[in-house]
Amino acid sequence: MGGCSPSQNEEPFLNLDKKSMLKSSTTTGGGCAATCNTILVVISIFVSIIVLTTYPTPKSTYHNLYTSLPFSDNTSISQNLFSLTRRPHVAGTQANADTAAYVLSTLSSYTVPSHITSYQVSLTYPISRILTLTRPSPDDTSTIKFDLRQEIYTGDPYSDVAGEVLPTFHAYAKSGTVAGQVIYVNYGRVEDYDTLKAMGVNVSGSIALARYGQIFRGDIVRHAYDAGAVAVVVFTDTKDYGGGGGEGSKWFPDDKWMPPSGVQVGTVYGGTGDPTTPGWTSTSDCERLSVDEVEMRGELPLIPSLPVSAADGDAIIRSIGGQVAGDDWQGGINAPVYRVGPGPGFLNLSYTGTQVVATIQNVFGVIEGSEEPDRFVLLGNHRDAWTFGAVDPNSGTAALLEVARRLGKLKKRGWRPRRTIIFCNWDAEEYGLVGSTEWVEENREMLASRVVAYLNVDCAVSGAGFHASATPQLDELLKQAAQKVQDPDNSSQTMYDSWISSNDSSKIGRLGGGGSDYAPFVQHIGVPSVDMFYGGGYAVYHSMYDDFIWMKKFGDPMFHRHVAVASIWGLVALKLADEEILPFNYVSYAQDLQASTKEFEDEVASMGISLIPLYSSIEKLKKSAIKINQQIKVIEESRFWLSSLWKKDRMEVRELNDRFLMAERAFTDRDGLLGRSWYKHLIYGPSKHDDYGSKSFPGIDDAIEKAKILNTPESWHSVQHEIWRVARVVTDASLVLSGKLT
Ligand SMILES: [Zn+2]
């Protein structure tokens, strides 16, 4: 796999090993007599001990070593990725239990003590799928029975295990047999159904054909149900995933694009965690909701759905007549004209899935803190994949193991973190963040009082370009860390240089979406969090072509981007674990809240709604944030070299840090979002119409949307109520930050 950085045999450029430092000091001494030598040796050992205890190696020296290129290793990253992705490993299967064992033993081999925590969770697998298309036109009345298979290409090194790839399906899809005329619904968004309505097209009783790409697939199914469709077929459009089509089009393995037979599978469950145990832990003997009770909660689809390939989508599109769809609804070059229907193309769709209670495994690695072992810095990534998972998620798993490998090496050189570092390798993320959510639900109180931050990486690498999201008190830390890491695509600059020069991606995103395992930490218990990756959307996502060959050819041929992710991820963790005063800044939080509040101004001004309560609570937060920052300055300036040994001083710092970590918890509310009570965070949550989309103040947003439809005094009053609710949690956070009882 090659690369710029040496492998395990590297010569460390800086040897921090205290033993060898002592050893070298004992070998000085030259021409004295034997007794003289002994005295010198004793004195020099004594002096060394004094020096080493009084001036331990500064943590920053270890941090610099951590990000140094000779310390990183792209070879072991690529080897780990290769091993993890040898077979498809869907949650609940033996193959995925095997990857858990691999992660466990690899962590142990890096001297990181590790263990597995299992849960019994409700998962679904496909049993049978039938999809036929009839084209009742005068010159073509043939019926196509789609084979719903992803093709193995000539020379595919994974052809021996291709049979282990699950048949294409949607996890938690509703079983059923339905038939109906097809209607093309574009990306299946709310606005797409508005367009159809305006065109006079009635979706009721038909089968919706939607294309992937703009919103979470579970919301595609839900919107189709809301519009009256009896089923949904979701296809991969060549325009979005196939390189646009056109002459000489190439696809995997010749190019990065999705082959015509490629299918994006995935969950259509809109909730978080095991759907049968909402809010509590899934164990073998726990209470479980019945299918009816789960359906009542409105998070599982109520009509059947199937994902299909670009080729099958094209065949269905060609069977649809009626009005020509708008320009932004059309396909790529050489695609037929997309029409909306209904029909005359007619689909018969039958899907049967089985719901089973399966065992999943979360793997943990723990490096215990030396001074504050009861404060936790968590690094998380999921391991389960829909197929081979080279990008999603094992590029992240390989990066996680690289962080562990480097920290193991630091340990050998004498480093111990101040706080405890925990590696979390989640299972069943793909089904709906199941592994992470069950663990958060099981350990809610302990996590809420002890976790400093949660740092998530799902797909570490799918191409070039760094992206990051965070709760705002971590913005500055993230930027500082990016300044210490070399840009993997241009060695003359840092990650930060390339990040800020690409204007659109330099903006740090927020963590309201439900797309990965940060969601239970941020949105359920209010833990400061980060999520980051290289690349972004990639064509073979959730298909059987997301394998090691794709990564090696197109995603990260030299594994340098993986190295960079491991560097910034580990460095942020090191800062949070080692710095005596937590590197948080809530001024950024207040600024972010202020900007988000401004966005509501136009919408509510004419309705007599006041944003003043929210603005004044943000002002309080800002004042508290400035005050705590000043307090840090005073502590730092008043220090002299031994003062950190004073107990009073240590308690002061601990109390200040507690305020930092508990302030985020204050943004959560016991009742949660109206109608979505699992989501406790009132600042960041998923968009109601796209689980992948992040919303600021989701409760206010929901209320405004409802009020716009109902337009009654009561509905506008509830907008004001939601503004008050948010203002109260922001005020709570400012009180926590100030550390004073009222
Ligand atoms: Zn993933």
Image (cartoon, rainbow, N blue to C red):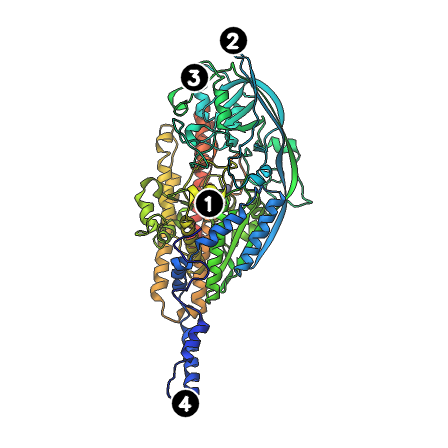
Q: Secondary structure at mark 4?
A: helix
Spot occupied by residue 268 in the image (x, y as percentages of width and height): 55, 33
On the question of residue 712 being in view, the answer is no
Q: Which residue, given by chain and number where applicable, does mark 4 sit on?
A: 36
Q: Which residue, given by chain and number where applicable, does mark 1 sit on?
A: 667
How far, Cα to Cα, is label 2 from label 3?
Answer: 30 Å
Q: Residue at x 42, y 16 (%)?
A: 324
Hey, which residue is sitting farthest right in the picture?
A: 285
Spot occupied by residue 300 in the image (x, y as percentages of width and height): 58, 32
How far, Cα to Cα, is label 2 from label 1?
Answer: 63 Å
How far, Cα to Cα, is label 4 from label 1?
Answer: 67 Å
Q: Is residue 369 above or below residue 625?
A: below
Q: Secondary structure at mark 2?
A: loop
- Closer mark to the observer between disc 4 and disc 2: 2
Q: Which residue type does callout 3 highlight?
A: Ala
Q: Which residue, given by chain and number where applicable, does mark 3 sit on?
A: 198
Q: Residues within 10 Å of mark 3 (few under 14, many from 20)?
A: few
